[in-house]
Image: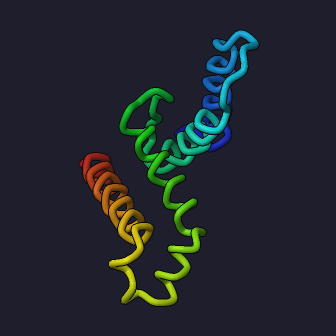
Amino acid sequence: KRTIEDKITEECSVLTRTIETYAGKPFDVTTILSAAVSNIIVCILLGKRYEYEDAVFLRLLKIVNENLQLSGSPAALLYNLFPKLGFLLGAGKKILKNEKELHDFIQATFIEYLQ
């Protein structure tokens, strides 16, 4: 079995090669670094990695980032204090929608992994 260190080293190599493709041009590192860290976690859990351009993987990263941002928003804080006002606040609905999509993906992925 590969060690965690091997998986991290492999992902760092992929990350370095990807960054080199930009040939010194400016680019947003947020998505690529999130993808690299997420790939290490997924590789440890499932033994596979996703390409940085994979549409499903990028969607999942977007959902997680969106939920993190929404969780700290004033609307989400109000929702946590007064759940009955949830119908007035779009943030709560969006968080729940994102959580369902993420849960469905994780469930399908783990079922596939276990078979």
At x 76% / y 13%, what residue is drawn? 24
Where does the image place residue 77, in percent across and percent down from the top left? 55, 79
Q: Position of residue 6 (x, y in %)?
A: 64, 35
Image height of 21 relative to 62, above or below: above
Q: Residue at 60% of width from left, 42% of height from top?
A: 34
> Which residue appears at 58% of the width and 68% of the height?
73
Apparent side of residue 96 relative to residue 24 in the rendered image (left or right): left
> Is residue 75 left or right of 94 when viewed as pictured?
right
The residue drawn where x is 50% and y is 42% is 43
Judged left or right of residue 75, residue 104 is left
Q: Residue furthest top?
A: 23
Residue 51, horizontal then vertical, whole percent: 47, 28
- Residue 60, given in percent of the width and then of the height, sits at 42, 47
Vertical arrangement, residue 80 with respect to residue 114, above or below? below
Residue at the front extreme, as displayed: 88
Quarter of the figure with residue 86: bottom left
Is 97 placed above or below 32 here?
below
Foreground residue, 10 or 18? 18
Location of residue 102 by image quarter:
bottom left
Instruction: From the viewer's perspective, tell me whether residue 115 is left or right of residue 102.
Output: left
Decide: is 61 above or below 84. above
